[in-house]
Amino acid sequence: MKDTSNRRLNPRTKAVHAGTRRSQYGEVSEAMFLTQGFVYDTAEAAEARFLESTREEFIYARYGNPTVAMFEDRIATLEGTEDAFACASGMAAVNGALISMLKAGDHVVAARALFGSCLYILDEVLPRYGVEVTLVDGRDLGAWRAAIRPDTKAVFFESLSNPTLEVIDIRGVCDLAHAVGATVIVDNVFATPTYSRALELGVDVIVYSTTKHIDGQGRCLGGVICGTTDFVRKVAEPYLKHTGGSMSPFNAWVMLKGLETLDLRVRAQAETCERLARELEGHPKLARVIHPHLASHPQQALARAQMDKGGTVLSLDLAGGKVAAFRFLNALEIVVISNNLGDAKSIATHPATTTHQRLPDGQKATLGLTPGLVRLSVGLEDPDDLIADVLAALDHA
Ligand SMILES: *Cc1c(COP(=O)(O)O)cnc(C)c1O
């Protein structure tokens, strides 16, 4: 396949072919260009390339690399954005997207329910450099309206929050932000590229931790910033390439191959996730089962309007608190205790004592992060085996 970027192909075709660059050998599988540098034919050619280089001319892997470029073009084509910049981790991408566009005196509005490291950037790093940050209840459009001001530069949220799976009215928030000319940046991990409609709903910059579903087998760290060519190449890239946040060619190769199977994996995982949520709802040991597409989710209608499926993660609130949660975790035989998500292996996490341990108790309570809460990232195992494993472990809780 030649150039897929301008053709109306369906996502699964793009995920397999988009961005491919072949060497003179015509390899079928994408080559891994494990090189930090590139040779110039002459001194004049080196000078010319440093002056100006095209997307097919490389200088140094921190600036760009053919394998990384293939990954960037493939994910941008899939997400529907003009361009993408691949980063060393999801956090390099979140940090890069925000810091590269902000300066002292700017104002940012963000949802309060955030991944711990995202909260650290918004709550501790940005204020230290004179950026004012207002945190709001992301579910409340009125709170966004009240917080967004004429001088607001950026708006940041997770499309589905971790681990309580709160849903943000993406179009509503984008309209409010755009009315004052603010840039909307979304951390889209929980939506995944498969169920993402971020661009269509008005988001300007879409960020992924590719460590999650895009790798999908828990091997490498990575992140990516998707947006307009202007934002990606003129705002994000200069900051990231000079501060060391670029993705390694090896990781880009893993992510590139991960994209080929992403859709199949995510759909199977989301299917099992919803089935598991339905089987578990009403279980006597559970105070709550949180899944965006269950009728019991307070924002089910919005979640259904924004995503074809509820994602690959559900949360369980054990009625017996921390003691019951730990007994449940320790009794699981197939599901492993860890903190990644989007992996082929199902993973259980106790956020209050691990990923969100640092948060003060008051803040945990505000976010609904109860001592009995367990996050389950649903993998690719047989659904019947998974359901049996979770039910047996609940017996021990
Ligand atoms: C994991 C995660 C990140 C951070 O990604 P890394 O690749 O671990 O740096 C950011 N946001 C969300 C929602 C995540 O789940």
Image: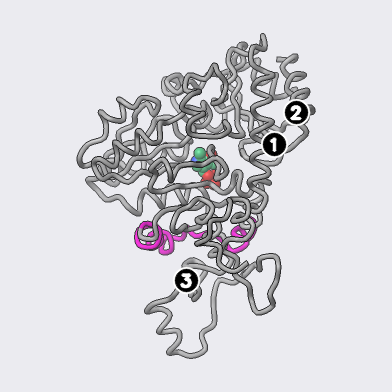
Determine the residue positioned at 45% across, 34% down: 114
| Magenta-highlighted residues | 231-254
Q: Amino acid at mark 2?
A: Leu
Whether the residues at callouts 1 and 2 have beta carbons within 8 Å, the answer is: yes
* Residue at the far top in the pictured view: 284
Specify the quadrant of the image occupied by residue 118: top left
Dominant secondary-structure state across the stretch colored magenta: helix
User: Magenta includes 252?
Assistant: yes
x and y percentages locating residue 308 in the rendered image: 56, 34
Q: Which residue is disc 1 drawn over?
A: 379
Q: Amino acid at mark 3?
A: Arg
| Of callouts 3 and 1, the N-terminal one | 3
Specify the quadrant of the image occupied by residue 337: top right
Specify the quadrant of the image occupied by residue 230: bottom left
Cα–Cα gap, marks 3 and 1: 37 Å
x and y percentages locating residue 216 in the rendered image: 65, 46
Q: Amino acid at mark 1?
A: Gly
Q: How is the image coloured?
A: one colour
The tag on residue 55 is 3
Q: Which residue is disc 2 drawn over?
A: 386
Assign the N terminus to one quadrant of the image.
Answer: bottom right
Q: Is residue 14 above or below residue 266?
A: below
Q: Secondary structure at mark 3?
A: loop
Cα–Cα gap, marks 2 and 3: 45 Å
* Residue at the far front in the pictured view: 8
